[in-house]
Image: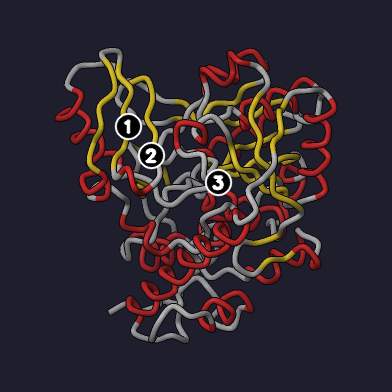
């Protein structure tokens, strides 16, 4: 049974309430904020004990108690709120007009094109992007040259220590920073931005852009690496993708061809903590991007992205992309918004069910306020008996 230890809001609280409870997302918000914690091979580890009663690790962690209603109020226009999937100014179907980007990036290459544009126009001076090594273990790299952005493209499916890289870079220089983030990483950045400790206030002003990635789950690197060795052997993996659910597989692209891995085997590699995630569409970003879905099917959809604009800053960047001819747009299918809302709501509901099961109490949802209006809305939806 989960027991919340409220005696420490420092490393001890993180260890007891997050790490030992299987809630750590690997976002790495605690790393490079605290010399006692480090990222190592897809895990957050404690290097030595810290006796602070309150610390940045606890304050910024996306799995410590979080006032999401306050974050939404501080960061977004209230009239844009859609309870199922966060702030919403518009939805679009997009892809990069540059064929080289489309060939080298994931799906339509929208994220790559937007980051290149933001760098070229001086909206940001560098972007923190995930990179892979031959062992499929992501790192996080600051990129200032727009020509290098494409080298970091394609989805990684294993968590990158992105926020730790932001912590390091934001202390080192004076430039404007953009981040490509997963939902848990974007939540951590939102907590850091809205409620920074005093010494972090100036560096958080350097965060000028967050492009979020839709995320259903991430993979445990240790399990996934073992599976890929079994499936691909010594073949170099160039990329991978998850087609719609009716395909029931992951496609792994190697130098020797495509390997289709049954989704059941991939599911066995999913991080346990992903069961407790409340966000599928990266609600705390300026722009959120995922794979496209339409009646035309996977052969067409895999070349496009679905994009949600959440902030005025995001709307301005998208308008600039249209003006500069960086992105191509096409009509969004009529039912896509409703389908996206339903999928997002189902993930939220599953998260709430799992948290309540963990604590044995619907009034104790660990890091989410049970009185949050989104929680009340999701619980009121027709998902069966609770």
Residue 359: quarter of image: bottom left
> Circle 3 is placed at which residue position?
33
Classify the position of the C terminus by image quarter. Answer: bottom left
**C-alpha gap between disc 2 and disc 1:** 6 Å
Q: Nearer the viewer, mark 2 or mark 3?
A: 2
Q: Residue at x 17, y 21 (%)?
A: 233
Q: Is residue 377 above or below residue 81?
A: below
Earlier in the chain: of badge 2 and badge 1, it is: 2
Q: Residue at x 54, y 76 (%)?
A: 378
**C-alpha gap between disc 1 and disc 3:** 37 Å
Judge by depth and name the residue closer to the eye, 298 or 327.
Answer: 298
Label 3 sits on a secondary structure element that is loop
Is the C-beta separation of discs 2 and 1 under 8 Å? yes
Q: Position of residue 113 (x, y in %)?
A: 66, 25
Q: Residue at x 77, y 37 (%)?
A: 318
Q: Position of residue 278 (x, y in %)?
A: 50, 64
Q: Residue at x 27, y 79 (%)?
A: 1
Query: Do we see residue 47 in this rendering?
Result: no
Label 2 sits on a secondary structure element that is loop
> Circle 1 is placed at which residue position?
251
Q: Position of residue 103 (x, y in %)?
A: 52, 17
Q: Nearer the viewer, mark 1 or mark 3?
A: 1
Decide if residue 99 is on the left or right side of residue 259.
right
Judge by depth and name the residue closer to the eye, 254 or 94.
Answer: 94
> Circle 2 is placed at which residue position?
242
Mark 3 surroundings within 10 Å by alpha-carbon count, few (fewer than 14), some (14 through 19), many (20 or more): some
Mark 1 surroundings within 10 Å by alpha-carbon count, few (fewer than 14), some (14 through 19), many (20 or more): some
Earlier in the chain: of badge 1 and badge 3, it is: 3
Q: Position of residue 274 (x, y in %)?
A: 39, 57
């Amino acid at each position: 049974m989960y027991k919340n230890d409220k005696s420490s809001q420092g490393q001890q609280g993180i260890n007891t309430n997050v790490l030992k409870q299987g809630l750590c997302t690997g976002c790495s918000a605690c790393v490079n904020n605290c010399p006692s914690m480090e990222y190592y091979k897809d895990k957050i580890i404690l290097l030595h004990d810290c006796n602070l009663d309150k610390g940045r690790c606890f304050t910024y962690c996306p799995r410590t108690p979080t006032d999401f209603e306050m974050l939404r109020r501080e960061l977004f226009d209230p009239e844009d709120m859609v309870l199922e999937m966060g702030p919403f100014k518009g939805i679009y179907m997009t892809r990069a007009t540059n064929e080289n980007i489309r060939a080298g990036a994931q799906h339509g290459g929208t994220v790559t094109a937007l980051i290149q544009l933001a760098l070229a126009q001086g909206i940001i001076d560098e972007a923190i992007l995930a990179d892979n090594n031959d062992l499929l273990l992501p790192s996080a790299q600051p990129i200032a040259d727009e020509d290098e952005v494409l080298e970091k493209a394609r989805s990684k499916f294993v968590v990158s220590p992105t926020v730790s890289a932001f912590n390091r870079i934001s202390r080192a220089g004076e430039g404007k920073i953009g981040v490509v983030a997963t939902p848990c990483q974007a939540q951590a950045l939102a907590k850091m931005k809205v409620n920074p400790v005093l010494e972090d206030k100036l560096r958080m002003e350097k965060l000028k852009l967050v492009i979020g990635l839709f995320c259903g789950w991430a993979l445990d690197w240790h399990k996934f690496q073992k599976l890929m060795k079994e499936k691909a052997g010594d073949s170099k993996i160039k990329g991978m993708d998850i087609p719609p659910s009716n395909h029931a597989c992951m496609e792994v692209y190697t130098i020797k061809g495509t390997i289709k891995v049954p989704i059941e085997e991939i599911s066995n590699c999913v991080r346990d903590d992903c069961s407790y995630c409340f966000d599928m569409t990266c609600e705390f970003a300026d722009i959120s991007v995922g794979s496209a879905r339409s009646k035309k099917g996977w052969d067409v959809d895999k070349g496009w992205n679905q994009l949600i604009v959440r902030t005025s800053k995001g709307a301005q960047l998208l308008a600039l992309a249209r003006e500069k001819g960086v992105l191509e747009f096409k009509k969004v299918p009529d039912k896509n918004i409703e389908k996206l809302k339903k999928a997002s709501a189902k993930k939220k509901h599953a998260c709430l069910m799992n948290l309540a099961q963990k604590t044995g109490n619907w009034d104790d949802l660990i890091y989410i306020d049970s009185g949050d209006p989104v929680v009340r809305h999701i619980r009121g939806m027709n998902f069966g008996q609770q």
